[in-house]
């Protein structure tokens, strides 16, 4: 068990080009579950592979338990990794696969057998120990890969999109299992995914990356409630936050022909930043829907209604001359139909404001 | 006007659907026939060789050829009396030792040009294969001079060195293609699990590519076993191999056709057996992609 630190860690594939990971700073506490999330090409996998010793660290340091890992080969880092395609040894049985890291570390045969048996018990693999990986289902293979990681009792677990080869249902159940197991074992874990739902549900803290740069490193709730910039705001949350770039007016902002009044607290933040236009972020659940006749709110027309049972999402466009799309969450039985004219009013005082030129939170 | 078009419409696609299927079936049967012709074309000379090996010399020359005859083992007896034994042993020794050497050298070399690429891989690979571009005839005189100078003429180790050199480029290329099929993550997982490069190569990679190794070994065995040119030029009584022995039946007094066939049948047997043994592994090799 150990804390993990990325200290200005960089990975540069071609000299002069933009680094794949640029001066990444992360401090991960002992026993913490941290998720690296971002779109493809964001450098999240590269960062994990740098920690694993599978990629060079071209600048800065990565420390595990205070020890600098630059130049230390993977096998001396005392870490275990679960790969996206599991990377099980095809010619070894499940038991041999799980025992392999112990064997490589010179653990005596009997102790190996005991540990493998215990791990297999936890993972429900006891009856499959003599099978070859190819005779297992995707979910079972995934668990063997987990087993191979946990028998070692490493200082850090690394997981590189371990759920992406599973079907949707398995993914949800395995997600919970992994999170529960990590809490029980208390091993520091770094988990890479492109799926923001996995990131939000599993991580103690989430590091959101884009183009090799860290955007925000915070708890899931903080990412959702106080996104550091417009990119984080748009990435976290499904459906995504509505983002509008709007001119600032006396009472708030102008949205097409109507004026959207903003609470005093938000207005003062805009004035302080000295902005004449502002990027306003409103989450789908931060709207109230009224009918078009009563004068208040922003006019919009419904294009698609998604009924999910507990909720419904209205995909609409504003009557602002530019048909700006907008997503609204309403109760499950909203009764809204395609083509309906609606009037939208933001409910919450906690709307999100970003500087349109930098994207930073105001 | 409307009625005929509507009745025609379902009819048109169905005949269109049938046509390619029928064409496909005809094509497939044509291909089958062609495959049989080619197959028999390859097999017939071998069958004829084996049949002739069981004939008397007199029966071997008849026109039209005799298909029915009293089989005899006389020719095989004659071949053994002529002393094929030492030649077989020489061939066996040269083939087995050179093949083992080739595998021992080609495996790390192929690893270095595939999974753990060294610098300028393409150049290295081209260098390997370029050694096969020069015809052996062109190199035989310098080789002969060198071998003579170091006093290694008519020595089986000379053949072993040459056969190893001859098969090494092919083996490196073959093994490289098998190595490339191995998912990189397997090696990464092994190193994460604490295995050294040598250990992960031995414990993780080699079991996965063993069908490929079997195929490579078989190719090397066939090439070394059948090699004639070096053997006939660099050996005499002590180190000569089976192909050299076979030629002995073509003499100025005449061709001992049945005996030649008997000797050739004996010479072909070990390769057939090696192929048969390797077959199991080779079939596994066909399902090689199923690693995930």
Image (cartoon, grey):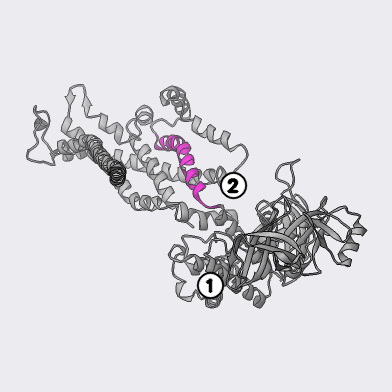
Where residue B192 sits in the image (x, y, percent)? 62, 60
Q: Nearer the viewer, residue B199 or A11?
A: A11
Q: Nearer the viewer, residue A207 or B40?
A: A207
Where residue B101 sits in the image (x, y, percent)? 46, 44
Q: Which residue is mark 1?
A: A109
Q: Is residue A107 left or right of residue A125?
A: right
Is residue B139 depicted above or below A357 in this figure? above
The overriding secondary structure of the stretch rendered in magenta is helix
Front disc: 2 or 1: 2
User: SS for tag 2?
Assistant: loop
Location of residue A105 (image quadrant)? bottom right
Residue that appears at 18% across and 40% down? B76
Is residue B183 depicted above or below A106 in this figure? above
Residue that appears at 75% across and 49% down? A58
Q: Nearer the viewer, residue B1 or A51?
A: B1
User: SS for tag 1?
Assistant: helix
Residue that appears at 56% across and 70% down? A147
Q: Are marks 2 and 1 in contact (CB under 8 Å)?
A: no
Q: Which residue is mark 2?
A: B116
Q: Is residue B171 magenta?
A: yes
Q: Is residue B152 magenta?
A: no
Q: Is residue A51 visible?
A: yes
Q: Residues within 10 Å of mark 2 (few under 14, many from 20)?
A: few
Q: Which residues are magenta?
A: B155-183
Residue that appears at 61% across and 42% down? B118
């Amino acid at each position: 068990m150990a804390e993990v630190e990325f200290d200005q860690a960089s990975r540069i594939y071609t000299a002069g080009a933009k680094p794949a990971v640029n001066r990444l700073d992360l401090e991960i506490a002992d026993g913490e579950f941290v998720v690296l999330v971002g779109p493809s090409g964001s450098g999240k996998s590269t960062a994990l592979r740098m920690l694993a010793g599978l990629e060079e660290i071209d600048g800065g340091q990565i420390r595990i338990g205070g020890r600098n890992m630059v130049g230390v080969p993977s096998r001396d880092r005392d870490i275990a990794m679960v790969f996206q395609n599991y990377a099980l040894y095809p010619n070894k049985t499940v038991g041999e696969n799980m025992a392999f890291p112990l064997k490589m570390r010179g653990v005596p045969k009997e102790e190996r057998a005991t540990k493998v048996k215990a791990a297999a018990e936890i993972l429900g693999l006891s009856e499959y120990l003599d099978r070859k990986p190819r005779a297992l289902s995707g979910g079972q293979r995934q668990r063997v890969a987990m087993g191979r990681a946990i028998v070692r009792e490493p200082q850090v677990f690394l997981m590189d999109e371990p759920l992406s080869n599973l079907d949707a249902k398995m993914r949800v159940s395995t997600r919970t299992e992994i999170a529960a197991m990590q809490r029980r074992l208390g091993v520091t874990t770094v988990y890479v995914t492109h799926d923001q739902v996995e990131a939000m549900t599993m991580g103690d803290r989430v590091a959101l990356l884009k183009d090799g740069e860290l955007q925000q490193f915070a708890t899931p709730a903080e990412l959702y409630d106080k996104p550091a910039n417009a990119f984080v705001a748009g990435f976290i949350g499904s459906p995504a936050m509505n983002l509008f770039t709007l001119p600032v007016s006396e009472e708030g902002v102008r949205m097409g022909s109507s004026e959207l009044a903003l609470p005093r607290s938000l207005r003062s933040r805009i004035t302080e930043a000295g902005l004449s236009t502002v990027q306003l972020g409103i989450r789908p659940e931060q709207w109230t829907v009224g009918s078009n006749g009563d004068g208040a709110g922003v006019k919009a027309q419904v294009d698609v209604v998604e009924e999910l049972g507990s909720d419904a999402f209205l995909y609409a466009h504003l009557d602002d001359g530019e048909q700006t799309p907008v997503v609204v969450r309403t109760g499950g039985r909203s009764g809204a139909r395609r083509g309906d004219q609606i009037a939208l009013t933001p409910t919450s005082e906690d709307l999100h404001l970003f500087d349109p030129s930098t994207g930073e939170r105001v | 006007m409307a009625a005929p078009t509507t009745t025609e419409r379902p009819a048109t696609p169905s005949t269109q659907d049938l046509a390619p299927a029928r064409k496909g079936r005809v094509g497939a049967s044509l291909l089958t026939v062609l495959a049989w012709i080619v197959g028999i074309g390859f097999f017939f000379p071998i069958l004829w060789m084996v049949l002739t090996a069981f004939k008397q010399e007199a029966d071997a020359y008849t026109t039209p050829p005799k298909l029915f005859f009293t089989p005899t083992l006389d020719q095989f007896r004659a071949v053994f009396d002529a002393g094929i034994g030492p030649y077989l042993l020489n061939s066996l020794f040269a083939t087995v030792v050179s093949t083992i050497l080739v595998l021992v050298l080609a495996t790390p070399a192929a690893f270095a040009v595939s999974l753990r690429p060294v610098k300028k891989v393409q150049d290295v690979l081209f260098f390997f294969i370029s050694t096969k571009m020069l015809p052996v005839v062109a190199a035989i005189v310098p080789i002969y001079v060198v071998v003579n100078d170091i006093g290694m003429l008519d020595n089986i180790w000379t053949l072993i060195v040459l056969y190893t050199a001859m098969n090494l480029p092919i083996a490196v290329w073959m093994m490289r293609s098998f190595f490339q099929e191995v998912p990189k993550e397997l090696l990464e997982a092994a190193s994460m699990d604490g295995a050294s490069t040598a250990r992960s190569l031995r414990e993780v990679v080699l079991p996965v590519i063993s069908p490929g190794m079997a195929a490579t070994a078989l190719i090397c065995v066939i090439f070394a076993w059948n090699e004639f040119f070096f053997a006939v030029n660099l050996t005499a009584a002590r180190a000569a191999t089976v192909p050299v022995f076979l030629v002995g039946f073509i003499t100025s007094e005449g061709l001992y056709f049945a005996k030649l066939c008997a000797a050739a049948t004996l010479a072909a047997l070990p390769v057939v057996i090696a192929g048969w043994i390797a077959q199991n592994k080779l079939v596994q090799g066909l399902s090689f992609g199923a690693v995930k």
